[in-house]
Amino acid sequence: MASPDSGSPESGPSVASTTAPVLDRDGVRLTVDEAVATVTLTNAAKRNAQSPVLWRALTEVGRVLPGSVRVVVLRGEGKSFSAGLDRQAFTPEGFDGEPSFLDLARGDDDVLDAAIAEYQDAFTWWRRGDIVSIAAVQGHAIGAGFQLALACDLRVAADDAQFAMRETSLGLVPDLTGTHPLVSLVGYARALEICATGRFVQAAEAERVGLANLVVPGDQLDAAAQDLAAALLAAPRAAVIETKALLQGAVGRPYEEQRRAERAAQARRLRDLAGIGD
């Protein structure tokens, strides 16, 4: 699953929303300001520790996101982006109304697989083709928190950000879709070392190895994320969508197939600019 939350330090200041929430429950708030949506983890008192109910709320955000949204900014209130899975998941009691992870492990294989697949749904929609997602990361991004940051297309980090994949150290594996983007960003050898040791990757290293696109002072994090969102909105939406699709498919395509994909995408763009329909 993901590493447990290791404590509940004092929370820091939150950024007030300028729009009424579209969704606000279970530790997740969604606000929309024209083409930019902001998803905020709101349980600062527990360092935005994650749980199945929070994952369902994140999945619902993906479902209710208006079609006008082009950029989604993901942030966490308080001093930590997300310190990982709430340790209560590993107790016999689990969460109210939820089977504990221990009970799931003792049960049917198909039920366990379906439960993990449901949890993964909260992490899969951030890279869909019609949006660009940005994680604004401060403080701890551990386990599930690290994987949630990795679920986004881009990451802006505060200079106090610390990333760690603690699952292997706990006898588990990263299972919330984080392995694929991690290897894509830093390569197999570094990804293995980060996961197998469970060590912390500080902000400066994260930027150097490609985990973070940008590192800024903590008091500039939200502004930097909004500036990046504005820059992404400057290009026509259709061009960004086509470019994102090309880049997402580049690793899995042979060179000649990628050349054909580029030609086809450019032909669509030229026809669109010339006012020629399909």
Image (cartoon, helix red, strand yellow):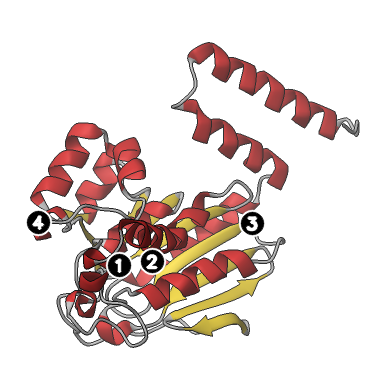
Query: Where does label 1 land, which residue?
Result: 138
Q: Amino acid at mark 4?
A: Ser
Q: Nearer the viewer, mark 1 or mark 4?
A: 4
Q: Is residue 160 visible?
A: no
Sequence-first disc among 3 and 4: 3
The span from disc 1 to disc 3 (Cα, nearest Å) is: 23 Å
Sequence-first disc among 1 and 3: 3
* Image quadrant in which you'd find residue 42: bottom left
Quarter of the image with the N terminus in it: bottom left
Query: Where does label 4 land, which residue?
Result: 169
Q: Are marks 3 and 2 in contact (CB under 8 Å)?
A: no
Left or right: where 192 falls relative to 73: left
The span from disc 2 to disc 1 (Cα, nearest Å) is: 8 Å
Q: Nearer the viewer, mark 3 or mark 4?
A: 4
Q: Amino acid at mark 2?
A: Leu
Q: Residue 193: image x %, image y %?
A: 13, 41
